């Protein structure tokens, strides 16, 4: 460290022997840009604070017996005794790597300058005039792996678009069929393509918040429930925003809820929800558009064309059966409609309830003995069939019930948390579920396996993983490489596409049907 004393306006240099004493390394050595580590507004040209000793010409400073120019002397760069090592030279009081005047501070181990796209350094690259940066993938900064840490952090910029216009995924050597160059973003960006067997982000920019508008910039907060109508519109229980949202034609709008938690019926714009987690579309014959499991309010709500009303429950946690507005629930999470009746996964009461036009009754579950924190519930195949399937989140199983009585059967899952395909397979907090029927592959149950960060499929008692690696993340692309973050619900449209409420990523994803 250079130690200066100011006495009656005279600044004196106490000598290089005291340099660096008493300060940590980070304070003793300014960073590559020359900013002072403690007082960033202080310019890096230390000699401007020094009054030349008598005997040295103007612009020179006495370092020992020699008068030197601190702006360019490689042995005294910026301060006496600060020597530039290797191929570095002193430029404007800073040790820099300069080669034909093109590189400013970026060097490899041999002292050669490195610029963007260079293969001279296996770990660093940068642009002229900028400090060196480390490649995200740790590989050489070549064209097929040139993602620079901190520069392209958006989910749309994870690869490098080659000159011929073909977009190659980061580190890959071949074209990814689920990716395409996106010239609207930048010349080096890529975006997911909704091709068969691909995972794409339908809406949400992965940042928690609230914003309607174009799907790519819209924002959600921990969405936990969703459903799809016959026209392909997606309705979302936007849990953290206390709203019901709609995705249609590439645009996100708010259907109901003012964003404040509460239990208020009324117009769609003034009604209030409290962390809604489940949503379903009833048959047109019922007379309203949506049913919502308003989890934090312990009630079932209905959304009509211009209003929100409470369908069942008192607003207080309980387990009482009886008339619609006398009965009570405890954190209802999922619901489905079968033959004009609404079946509710009453999570806090560890049971399945059934709601008809006038009352609420217990269907199945006696505490935690047979079912534990049920989350999702779906009818098998159509609303006219009588079998329902249940995502038993704390029991780590998929259960079924024939709606004729209280009996529950295990369809899949060993009951111990884990991640295993096969029969019976293992789940870790399975939540939302839906029914998938494909002409070429028969029928199966699709499961949002939340704590495994995966989408699973159960067919004839055998569990398989459709997408997700078991590690949280947000990566679009092929189903074998895509990642999810605590998905809470799934919904299948008429084409077999699977929509996912990717709760931890605050967005809605889609697995495109093969």
Image: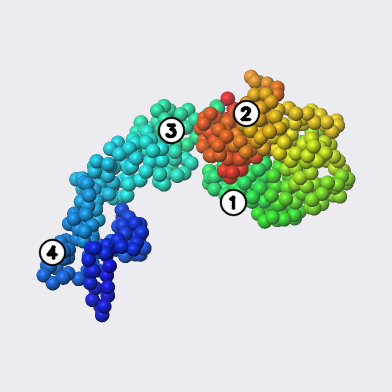
Q: Nearer the viewer, mark 1 or mark 3?
A: 3
Whether tag 1 and tag 2 are in contact, CB under 8 A, the answer is no
Total labels: the figure holds 4
SS assignment at label 1: loop
Please name the residue shown 77% across and 36% down the image: 371
Q: Quadrant of the C terminus?
A: top right
**Alpha-carbon span between mark 2 and mark 3:** 29 Å
Q: Position of residue 268 (x, y in %)?
A: 71, 51
Please name the residue shown 66% across and 33% down the image: 427
Q: Which residue is mark 4?
A: 65
Q: Position of residue 247 (x, y in %)?
A: 61, 42
**Alpha-carbon span between mark 1 and mark 4:** 67 Å
Q: Of residues 467 and 1, which is closer to you in this image? A: 1
Please name the residue shown 34% across and 40% down the image: 123
Q: Which residue is mark 2?
A: 420
Q: Earlier in the sequence, mark 2 or mark 3?
A: 3
Q: Which residue is mark 3?
A: 169
SS assignment at label 4: loop
Q: Earlier in the sequence, mark 1 or mark 4?
A: 4
Of the numbered discs in the image, which one, if any, rests on residue 229?
none
Of the numbered discs in the image, which one, if any, rests on residue 210?
1
**Alpha-carbon span between mark 3 and mark 4:** 59 Å
**Alpha-carbon span between mark 1 and mark 3:** 30 Å
Please name the residue shown 36% across and 59% down the image: 24
Residue 22 relative to residue 235: left or right: left
Outermost residue on the top side: it is 440
Q: Quadrant of residue 181?
A: top left
How many other residues sit within 10 Å of disc 4, few (<14), some (14-19) or many (≥20)?
Answer: few
């Amino acid at each position: 460290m250079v130690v200066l004393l100011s006495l009656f306006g005279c600044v004196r240099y106490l000598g290089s022997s005291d340099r660096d004493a008493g300060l940590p390394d980070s304070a003793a050595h300014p960073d590559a840009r020359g900013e002072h580590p403690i007082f960033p507004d202080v310019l890096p040209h230390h000699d401007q604070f020094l009054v030349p000793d008598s005997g040295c010409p103007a612009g020179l400073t006495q370092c020992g017996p020699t008068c030197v120019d601190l702006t360019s002397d490689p042995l005294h760069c910026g301060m006496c005794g600060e020597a530039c090592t290797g191929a570095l030279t002193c430029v404007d009081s800073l040790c820099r790597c300069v080669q034909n005047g093109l590189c400013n501070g970026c060097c490899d181990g041999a002292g050669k300058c490195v610029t963007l796209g260079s293969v001279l350094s296996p770990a660093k690259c940068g642009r002229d005039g900028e400090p060196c940066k480390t490649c995200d993938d740790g590989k050489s900064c070549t064209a097929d792996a040139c993602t620079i840490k901190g520069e392209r952090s958006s989910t749309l910029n994870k690869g490098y678009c080659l000159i011929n216009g073909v977009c190659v995924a980061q580190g890959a050597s071949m074209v990814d069929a689920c990716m395409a160059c996106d010239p609207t973003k930048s010349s080096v960006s890529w975006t997911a393509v909704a091709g068969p067997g691909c995972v794409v982000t339908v809406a949400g920019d992965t940042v928690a918040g609230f914003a309607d508008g174009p799907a790519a910039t819209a924002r959600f907060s921990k969405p936990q429930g969703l459903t799809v109508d016959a026209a392909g519109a997606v309705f979302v229980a936007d849990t953290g925003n206390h709203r019901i949202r709609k995705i249609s034609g590439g645009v996100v709008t708010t259907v109901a809820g003012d964003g404040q938690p509460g239990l208020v019926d009324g117009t769609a714009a003034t009604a209030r929800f409290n962390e809604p987690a489940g949503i379903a579309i009833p048959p047109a014959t019922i007379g309203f558009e949506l049913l919502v499991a308003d989890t934090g309010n312990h009630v079932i709500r209905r959304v009509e064309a211009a209003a929100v009303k409470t369908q069942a429950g008192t607003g207080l946690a309980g387990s009482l059966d009886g008339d619609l507005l006398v009965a009570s629930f405890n954190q209802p999470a999922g619901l489905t409609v079968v033959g004009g009746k609404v079946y509710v996964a009453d999570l806090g009461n560890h049971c399945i309830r059934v709601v008809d036009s006038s009352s609420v009754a217990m269907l199945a579950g006696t505490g935690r003995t047979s079912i534990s924190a049920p989350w999702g519930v779906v009818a098998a195949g159509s609303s006219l069939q009588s079998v329902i399937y249940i995502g038993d989140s704390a029991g780590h199983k998929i259960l079924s019930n024939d709606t004729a009585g209280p009996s529950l059967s295990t369809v899949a899952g060993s009951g111990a948390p884990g991640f295993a395909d096969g029969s019976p397979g293992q789940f870790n907090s399975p939540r939302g579920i839906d029914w998938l029927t494909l002409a070429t592959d028969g029928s199966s149950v699709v499961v949002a396996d939340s704590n495994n960060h995966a989408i699973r499929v159960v067919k004839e008692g055998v569990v398989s993983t459709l997408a997700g690696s078991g590690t949280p993340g947000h990566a679009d692309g092929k189903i074998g490489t895509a990642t999810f973050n605590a998905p809470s619900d799934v919904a299948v449209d008429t084409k077999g596409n699977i929509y996912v409420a990717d709760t931890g990523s605050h967005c809605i994803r889609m697995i495109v049907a093969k």
